[in-house]
């Protein structure tokens, strides 16, 4: 029994009991199975740590000892599992449960798991012939030979997709899993593979392995384990044409490797692909006695082809003799699409008279019939001749089908059309198109067949390239090449299949030159141009990654421009008319999202203290409520939608009028952060939960506090009313959930079966269930009759921040710190979908009132809106913040580095304070930077879970250190530069060797996030501080914990040693700074002058001063001889995140949430700063005077991001 088979057996048994083993446990399982020695220093069969990165630096013996009891529970064995009997017990339990190997007889599965993606609908009424082909392929797949790969080949329009759909219907019940994708929109290999592995693993594997071979191995594992049917349609999209037909396009070669491996390796599943081209890399494996079969699909017999004519949707009857029918169908090669096209033509021109059509002699719409011509018509040639006959108005409509990529209604098309004449004649144009082209219907919308979409896309790109080259403007003005009003995944397709091919065909430099000439032309000759041309030019320039500094788009109409995430420094938009375009929004981490009761608007509360409301139909921000002075942790609409409540870390609740968008009430009764709020279903009450351990119940008529509930012994993190208004549930850091009677607000039940505390709770719409999302990574389902736990979901890999039921009760959504959203079926609480697009923790999830949409807010500064039916996000609101998180000086004081929430590291010259380099490789916030003692290296860490090492001679990234499973909060070099310490949200500290950059140790004694690490000046000690309110002191020879300091009563954000190593300073959430004696680790002094969290502390190089930065917006300078506060600096207007002295004692720097770095010259003789550096914003000095089409709040947002009038400051 091999290790993969054994591991899969254990995972399946665990799943039945809802016990899921994580990646660390998987690695431990494998090393035990393979007999590796636990001790890293052992020379006998040591663990090859490069193959098991989760074990790097860990004490494997300890991890294994904790895993054995879990395994005993999974296998339900009475035997005590140890390393020696591990393998034997697993094999024994497998044998007990083993089923006979699946025979060649087909097993019927009544309801296979399906992940189905197609816009086409198949009915038996429009499926013709193919009896023999179906019989052949079915025999290949479910018969005795069972070929591993079957390719259905044939020209465009021949009916490959219809055959595939019919085939799936016939054989689906012989498979456990059925997975279908169309490649017509050229999806990335990683996207398709991720979807496939998530589906086959029942949403357990959501992250791809790091190499292609490992990724393919995971697919093969499931194909061997289960009977799986994988269907990939339109594979020709990723293949080259012409002389290299059948070879893969650049960037899609990995598909070929997957197909080949599926053919080569033995398994019990089948891959079916359709393609117009033969796949060259599979040809040697194809044949009757080989694992792959190709079926070249022929045209239809004339009697079957005749049925296509007879199936047209009107009363016209086609007439002709059998010979004439045979002649026409044979000429068109029995190609169903070609026959549909010619049927439209004969119906419209000849009223169904086949004889008249043949006598007309225009077999190919303009090409005379040659009786000796036996070669069948090529579909491309047929489409070319058809295209010539189309009017400009007909082409205009068909191009929009190619751009939109989805079924369209007439109202959809009207929104795209600019010409009033085209809009007025839309219905007659669609009717006239029907004379030439068969328009299909899908759910009351019109859709083109894939062949026609591809053809029109090719013609569109050809025409656009011609216009760009010749500087003519036609399609460039009448059509948007990319639509920001499209669903987000459609916009991605438009970029991939329209913008990128234009760039490739024209060449980057040539295209840029031509676009600049076009821009000059339209400004000179068509200043009032109202079309799409300016927006198209702007989108193409952005896609080219052009530096747009100083570009002039003044007095132009700009439509469908996607300016989110773009730098538009000094761009001139004076007098421009901006329509259907999007800019970067101003928001950071999103803590809470909520739909209005009518589902038209979405509100969000974020880290900036603002509330924002978007009209999701128009993709536009409507309002920005300002009033809170700290983070907005929770928001909730009243049931009638007239009020919006917000709870903040400024200790207040605000009640907003959604009609006039003004604040009606500010409730100030709480003595701590307001973390959770909820209206009762009848709207008469509002409940709030706070850091002050209380719940308050407010009357919504006058917003007076009716009750204060004090039973909790910790922060109240979550509250929710039951749908019948009779109960209130609350979750707290005291690890309990309490159920309150809303008549008298007495506690009826206290629930504590959910391990660690609940961060989010929610009743089901029928009130029968209560769900909690928990700190211990689990989701608990409670029955509300007896309030007993009936399910525990353990598939998240980090704390669960948010849970919510869909209003129809069919789905449950959960958002986690593991950056993942999971969608659960509430009938059986199986995970249906796993959404992985967020790149930071997911703080909030909320369903729309009709259950069709799901909104999510994240630490990655995005709000995503998902279509719950197709599992795709169709709106993304991108935020931006310029908060400075870290500042650090080089050892010689000549440079300092800064990092922040714009994801960049900036290197500054201290002689003139110019930015000399911007390092842009991190994918998320940069949380800390540190120079090595010799100044040759710079280390940085990020919310993207990575540590990066940079060469300071050229500021190239040398290596990226991976291993942390969550945010990396702090990094620090040892005094000799040989070690680097990092710590993070995964509760660990990692010690890295700086010669080979291998992880030597992983320290796991902290029981929550670790915020800060620092070495002592002699290198003998390491100090760390964390969310668990502790400071730990480690011996650096063996990295064992020597001391744990517990006097702080809140999170400890920062620790630092004095230069002589005799003192340790710590700054905490409890608003204090503590000074510790490092000889006995007794607290010598506690500074209490700050009025909010102390985020950062730093000693001066001579040790005489200590600086501290706080969320009270101040910096304090302390004398370490008498512990008096010497100075308080108030130059910052937001929380101070970082303070640092230069080693040469010449400068002192601070960084803040206000986006500024302030610098003082030492010594502190004056209380004024010497230099203020503002981190450049996305729209710095962008001119927006007299801009039309933007609301005032949008203009205000642009100004906050740097936009100005004609006279920038």
Image (spheres, rainbow, N blue to C red):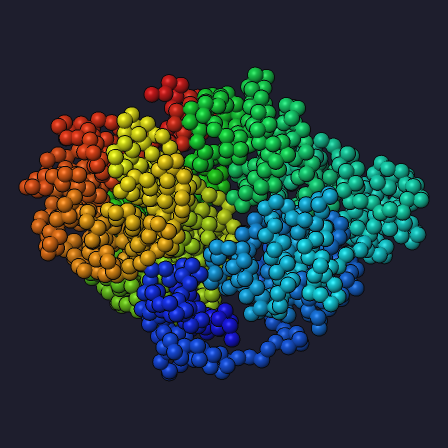
Is residue 253 something that shows in the picture?
yes
Is residue 320 something that shows in the picture?
no
Q: Residue at x 77, y 38 (%)?
A: 384
Q: Nearer the viewer, residue 436 or 1035?
A: 1035
Q: Position of residue 722 (x, y in %)?
A: 35, 60
Q: Position of residue 835 (x, y in %)?
A: 47, 54
Residue furthest to the top: 524
Q: Nearer the viewer, residue 824 or 1009?
A: 1009
Above or below, comparing residue 788 to residue 1201 in the picture: below
Dividing the picture into quadrants, the one containing residue 659 is top left
Q: Position of residue 42 (x, y in %)?
A: 35, 67
Above or below, comparing residue 1049 to residue 439 in the picture: below
Q: Position of residue 22 (x, y in %)?
A: 40, 64
Dividing the picture into quadrants, the one containing residue 1028 is bottom left
Locate residue 1036 relative to residue 927 in the image: left or right: left
Q: Nearer the viewer, residue 1085 or 162?
A: 1085
Q: Residue at x 53, y 62 (%)?
A: 218
Q: Residue at x 90, y 41 (%)?
A: 369
Q: Residue at x 17, y 59 (%)?
A: 1043
Above or below, comparing residue 1207 to residue 819 in the picture: above
Residue furthest to the left: 1122
Q: Quadrant of the C terminus?
A: top left
Query: Number of labelled discs?
Result: 0
């Amino acid at each position: 029994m091999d290790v993969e088979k054994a591991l899969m057996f254990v995972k399946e048994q665990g799943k039945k009991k809802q016990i899921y083993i994580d990646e660390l446990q998987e690695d431990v399982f494998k090393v035990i199975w393979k007999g590796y020695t636990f001790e890293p220093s052992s020379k006998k069969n040591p663990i090859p740590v490069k193959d098991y990165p989760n074990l790097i630096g860990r004490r494997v013996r300890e991890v294994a000892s904790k895993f054995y009891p879990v395994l005993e529970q999974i296998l339900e064995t009475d035997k005590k599992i140890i390393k020696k009997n591990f393998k034997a017990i697993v094999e024994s339990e497998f044998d007990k449960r083993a089923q006979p190997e699946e025979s060649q007889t087909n097993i019927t599965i009544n309801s296979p798991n399906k992940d189905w993606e197609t816009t086409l609908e198949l009915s038996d009424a429009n499926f013709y012939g193919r009896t023999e082909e179906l019989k052949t392929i079915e025999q290949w797949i479910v018969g005795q030979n069972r070929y591993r790969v079957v390719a259905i080949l044939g020209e465009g329009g021949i009916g490959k997709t219809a055959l595939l759909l019919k085939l799936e219907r016939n054989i689906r019940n012989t498979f456990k899993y059925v997975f279908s994708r169309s490649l017509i929109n050229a999806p990335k290999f990683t996207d398709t593979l991720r979807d496939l592995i998530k589906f086959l693993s029942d949403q357990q594997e959501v992250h791809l392995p790091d190499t292609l071979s490992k990724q393919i191995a995971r697919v093969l594992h499931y194909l061997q384990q289960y009977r799986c049917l994988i269907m990939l349609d339109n594979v020709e999209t990723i293949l080259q044409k012409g002389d290299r037909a059948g070879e893969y396009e650049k960037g899609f070669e990995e598909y070929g490797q997957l197909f080949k491996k599926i053919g080569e390796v033995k398994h019990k599943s089948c891959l079916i692909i359709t393609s117009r081209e033969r796949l060259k890399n599979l040809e040697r494996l194809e044949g009757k006695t080989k694992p792959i079969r190709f079926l070249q699909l022929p045209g239809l017999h004339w009697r079957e082809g005749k049925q296509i004519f007879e199936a047209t949707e009107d009363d016209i009857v086609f007439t002709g003799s059998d010979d004439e029918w045979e002649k026409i169908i044979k000429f068109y090669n029995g190609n169903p699409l070609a026959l549909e096209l010619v049927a439209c033509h004969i119906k419209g021109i000849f009223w169904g008279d086949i004889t008249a059509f043949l006598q007309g002699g225009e077999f190919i719409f303009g090409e005379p019939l040659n009786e000796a011509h036996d070669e069948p018509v090529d579909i491309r040639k047929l489409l070319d001749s058809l295209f010539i006959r189309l009017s400009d108005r007909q082409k205009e409509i068909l191009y929009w089908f190619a751009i939109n990529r989805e079924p369209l209604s007439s109202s959809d098309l009207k929104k795209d059309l600019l010409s009033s004449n085209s809009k007025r004649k839309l219905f007659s144009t669609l009717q006239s198109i029907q004379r030439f082209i068969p328009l299909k219907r899908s759910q009351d919308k019109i859709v083109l067949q894939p062949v026609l979409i591809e053809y029109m896309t090719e013609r569109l790109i050809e025409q656009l390239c011609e216009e760009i080259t010749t500087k003519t403007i036609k399609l460039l003005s009448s059509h948007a090449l990319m639509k920001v009003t499209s669903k987000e995944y459609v916009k991605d397709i438009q970029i991939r299949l329209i913008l990128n091919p234009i760039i490739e065909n024209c060449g980057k430099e040539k295209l840029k030159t031509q676009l600049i000439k076009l821009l000059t032309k339209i400004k000179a000759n068509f200043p009032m141009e109202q079309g799409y041309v300016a927006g198209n030019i702007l989108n193409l320039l952005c896609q080219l990654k052009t530096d747009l500094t100083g570009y002039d788009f003044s007095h132009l109409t700009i439509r469908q421009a996607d300016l989110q995430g773009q730098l538009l420094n000094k761009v001139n938009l004076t007098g421009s008319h901006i329509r259907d375009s999007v800019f970067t929004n101003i928001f950071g981490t999103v803590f809470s999202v909520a739909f209005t009761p009518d589902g038209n608007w979405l509100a969000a509360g974020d880290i900036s203290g603002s509330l924002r409301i978007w009209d999701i139909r128009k993709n536009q921000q409507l309002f920005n409520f300002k009033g809170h002075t700290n983070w907005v942790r929770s928001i909730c609409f009243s049931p009638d939608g007239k009020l919006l409540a917000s709870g903040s870390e400024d200790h207040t609740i605000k009640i907003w009028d959604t009609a006039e968008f003004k604040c009606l009430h500010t409730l100030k009764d709480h003595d701590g952060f307001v973390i959770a709020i909820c209206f009762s279903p009848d709207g008469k009450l509002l409940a709030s939960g706070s850091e002050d351990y209380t719940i308050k119940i407010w009357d919504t008529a006058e917003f007076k506090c009716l009750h204060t509930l004090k039973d909790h012994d910790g922060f109240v993190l979550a509250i929710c009313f039951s749908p019948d208004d009779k109960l209130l549930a609350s979750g707290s850091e005291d690890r309990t959930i309490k159920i309150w009677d809303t008549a008298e607000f007495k506690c009826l039940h206290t629930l504590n079966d959910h391990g660690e505390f609940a961060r989010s709770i929610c009743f089901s719409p029928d009130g029968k269930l209560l769900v909690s999302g928990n700190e211990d990574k689990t989701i608990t389902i409670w029955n509300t009759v007896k309030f007993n736990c009936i399910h525990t979901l353990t598939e998240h890999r980090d704390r669960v921040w948010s849970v919510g039921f869909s209003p129809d009760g069919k789905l449950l959504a959960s958002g986690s710190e593991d950056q993942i959203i999971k969608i659960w079926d509430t009938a059986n609480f199986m995970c249906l979908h796993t959404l992985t697009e967020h790149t930071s923790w997911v703080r909030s999830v909320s369903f729309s009132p009709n259950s069709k949409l799901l909104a999510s807010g994240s630490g990655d500064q995005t709000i995503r809106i998902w279509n719950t039916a197709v599992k795709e996000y169709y709106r993304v609101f991108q935020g931006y913040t310029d908060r400075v998180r870290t500042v650090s000086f080089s050892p010689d004081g000549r440079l300092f580095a800064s990092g922040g929430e714009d994801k960049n590291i900036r290197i500054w010259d201290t002689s003139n304070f110019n930015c000399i380099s911007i390092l842009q490789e991190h994918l998320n916030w940069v949380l800390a930077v540190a120079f090595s003692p010799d100044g040759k290296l710079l280390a940085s860490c990020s919310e993207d879970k990575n540590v990066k090492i940079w060469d300071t001679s050229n500021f190239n990234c040398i290596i990226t250190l991976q291993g942390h499973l969550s945010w990396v909060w702090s990094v620090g070099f040892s005094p000799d530069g040989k070690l680097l310490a990092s710590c993070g949200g995964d509760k660990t500290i990692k010690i890295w060797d700086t010669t080979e950059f291998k992880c030597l140790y992983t320290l796991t004694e902290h029981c929550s996030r670790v915020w800060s690490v620092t070495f002592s000046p002699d290198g003998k000690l390491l100090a760390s501080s964390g969310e668990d309110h502790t400071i730990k002191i480690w011996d650096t020879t063996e990295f064992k914990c020597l001391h744990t300091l517990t006097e702080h009563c809140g999170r400890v954000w920062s620790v630092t040693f004095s230069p002589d190593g005799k003192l340790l300073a710590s700054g905490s959430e409890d608003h204090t700074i503590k000074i510790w004696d490092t000889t006995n680790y007794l607290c010598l002094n506690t500074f209490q002058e700050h009025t909010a969290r102390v985020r950062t502390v730093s000693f001066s190089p001579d040790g005489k001063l200590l600086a501290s930065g706080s969320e009270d917006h101040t910096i304090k300078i302390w004398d370490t001889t008498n512990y008096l506060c010497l100075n308080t600096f108030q130059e910052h207007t937001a929380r101070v995140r970082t303070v640092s002295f230069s080693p040469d004692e010449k400068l002192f720097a601070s960084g803040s949430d206000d986006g500024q770095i302030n610098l003082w010259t030492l010594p502190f003789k004056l209380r004024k700063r010497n230099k203020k550096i503002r981190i450049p914003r996305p729209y710095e000095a962008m001119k927006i005077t007299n801009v039309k089409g933007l609301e005032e709040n949008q203009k205000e947002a642009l100004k906050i991001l740097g936009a100005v009038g004609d006279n920038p400051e």
